[in-house]
Image (cartoon, rainbow, N blue to C red):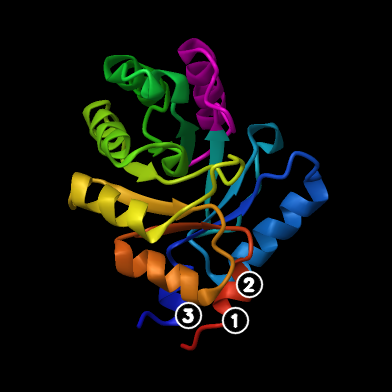
Amino acid sequence: MPSRSEVAALIDHTLLAPEATAEQVAALVAEGAELGTFSVCVSPSMLPVAATEGLKVACVCGFPSGAHTSEVKAAEAARAVADGVDEVDMVINLALAKQGDWEGVEADIRAVREACAGALLKVIIESAALTDDEIVAACKASEAAGADFVKTSTGFHKAGGASTHAVALMRRTVGDRLGVKASGGIRDAETALAMIEAGANRLGLSASRAILDGLED
């Protein structure tokens, strides 16, 4: 079983509540540094973030619906990179996915990929809203478009968040070529460990402290 510090190093410590304040974001950064998380993940309007050394900064793009034009997503990603982020977590266009327009999904992701410059790109496929075949196709489109990670969920969709089934399917699809991030509804150490066992090598968590307190070094 991974240790507390090993799990911490996989965590994007996240605060995406629409009402989150700058003071709360500052507290998030301080807590992430204290806990030893990989990064903090915030809304783009909170950038730039003065992170401590060794703590990466991520932000979301086209969030939470993904129903933005590719041009708007690309502009949002470019602004985030200019504001100093290391990573961008974008949401796919779910309507295109449900219509089976995988070329359109790929083009949407590629537009953001090109706008991200050197930043790492994670693609949120909203797995709970997709069939298994659609999950596989979304992962393939993400890889073809140049993504670095595929990610399960925004945590805002009524269909639900991450599942070990989706994580395992995503890992089988992308192999070791891309990362897999599990996010959405992970609130205890048991669930976090199950996601890692299923193949996740990054976790999006808002309850990071509570989860890490359930682990031992």
Point out the tag, 3 or 1, that comes first from the N-terminus.
3
Residue 193 vs residue 79, the one in the foreground: 193
Tell me the magenta residue range. 61-86
Q: As shown in the figure, which amino acid type bears the numbered disc 3?
A: Arg
Q: Quadrant of the N terminus?
A: bottom left
Task: Give x and y (percent) for residue 137.
Answer: 26, 32
Q: Position of residue 178 (x, y in %)?
A: 25, 46
Q: Label 3, on which residue? A: 4
Examine the rendered structure and indicate whether residue 16 appears above or below residue 52.
Answer: above
Any mark on residue 209, and which? 2
In contact (CB < 8 Å): disc 2 and disc 1: yes
Is 80 one of the magenta-colored residues? yes
Which numbered disc flags the more N-terminal residue, 2 or 3?
3
Q: Which residue sits at x=60%, y=41%? A: 158
Give the CA distance from mark 2 to mark 3. Answer: 10 Å
- Residue type, numbered disc 2: Arg
Q: Residue at x 34, y 60 (%)?
A: 201
Above or below for 2 versus 76: below
Q: Is 3 above or below relative to 124? A: below
Q: Secondary structure at mark 2?
A: helix
Instruction: Measure the C-alpha gap from mark 3 to mark 1.
Output: 8 Å
Up the image or down, 36 lies above or below 106; here it is below
Which residue is denoted by mark 1 in the rendering?
Answer: 213
Give whichever of 135, 73 is nearer the camera: 135
Q: Could you say which quadrant of the image residue 148 lies in? A: top left
Neighbor class of circle 2 (other Cα within 10 Å; few <14, some 14-19, many 20+) is some
Please say if the residues under marks 2 and 3 sit with CB atoms less than 8 Å apart: no
